[in-house]
Amino acid sequence: MTSRLVVPCPAKVNLFLAVGPRDERGYHPLRTIFQAIDLCDILVIETNPAEPGFFCDDPGVPLDNTVTKAMRLIPSLPPLRVTLEKKIPSESGLGGGSSDAAGLLRAAIKLGFLAPEDAPAIALSIGADVPFFLVGGRARAEGYGERLEPLPDRETEWLVVVRPDVGCPTGPAFAKLDERPYEWREFPADDLLYNDFERVAPRYCLDLIDRLRALGATDAALTGSGSAVFGRFASLEEAERAKEKLVQEGFVRIWVTRTLTRAESLYLE
């Protein structure tokens, strides 16, 4: 008998992101505060399918990806049909690939193919951001993804997320940071947005951050290494007005989103 599970895979923004010095392995430790938002990819998982395999509606997603890697890392996983509906853009700093991998792990737990206590290690082996999406909501992370502290849910915040036409690959962004001396910032005592990658972000990203503030955002920042930026707005109405202005100015990839609670970001259908 075939069963079907629908798994929303939410994007994230980094409310705070401080990059540490490169270690002897070439990796950078981070201090960051993640927040899940309601821009989601969708995974559809079918058990006992007539045609197993991985399928995606976005031809830009390679067949060897974070979801198929997660599938390979679960020894007891039977043949499944996994269909990924992409909404979160790549090279944006929104964590789409990481969230998709975590969505597959969460589905495997729900279906009884993976023990919950085994999921974090598998998640970390896929990528440093993946463990967050097993926790959801808001969380603080330090190191290389292995130290993760869930934070209490806050009241809903409305965000406008804008992804410029050009992406920002993570590797070159780290390399540019390595060329600039600066101190590794501690976690903040306030709730102001901060991101070290703004030191090396393209001018168009910084201009877009300024534009969001001019349109009424209480604060705005880059997420991840970019290229997406986001602004916080006091209400849905103000966020919608800002989006309308940006559409008139020629921006295409714009989303009005809200923050998710932990329960909302881990929901399975």
Image (cartoon, rainbow, N blue to C red):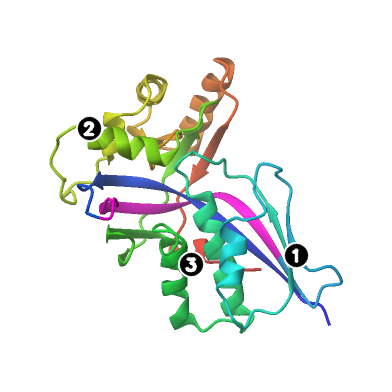
- Residue 19 counted in the magenta span: no
Q: Secondary structure at mark 2?
A: loop
- Mark 1 and mark 2 lie on one chain; the one further toward the N terminus is 1
Rate crowding at label 1 as few (under 14), some (14 to 19) or many (20 or more) other CA atoms within 10 Å: some
Read off the magenta span: 25-44
The image shows residue 9 at horizontal and vertical percentages of: 57, 57
> Which residue bears the numbered disc 3?
263
Going by the image, does 190 lie left or right of 232? left
Q: What secondary structure is marked by label 1?
A: strand
- Residue most toward the right? 50
* Position of residue 242 in the picture relative to residue 223 (left or right): right
Q: CA distance from mark 1 to mark 3?
A: 29 Å
Depth check, mark 1 against mark 2: the one in front is 2
In this rendering, would 94 be left or right of 194?
A: right
- Residue 182's label in the rendered image is none
Contact (Cβ within 8 Å) of mark 2 with mark 3 = no
Q: CA distance from mark 2 to mark 3?
A: 41 Å
| Res. 179 mark | 2
Q: Is residue 196 above or below residue 52?
A: above
Q: Which residue is mark 1?
A: 53
**Residue 74 on image: x %, y %:** 57, 76
Q: Identify the residue shown where x is 19% and y is 32%.
A: 180
Where residue 95 sits in the image (x, y, percent)?
48, 50
| Sequence-first disc among 1 and 3 | 1
**Mark 3 Cα shell of 10 Å, populated few (<14), some (14-19), many (≥20):** few
Tell me the amino acid under the disc marked 3.
Answer: Ala
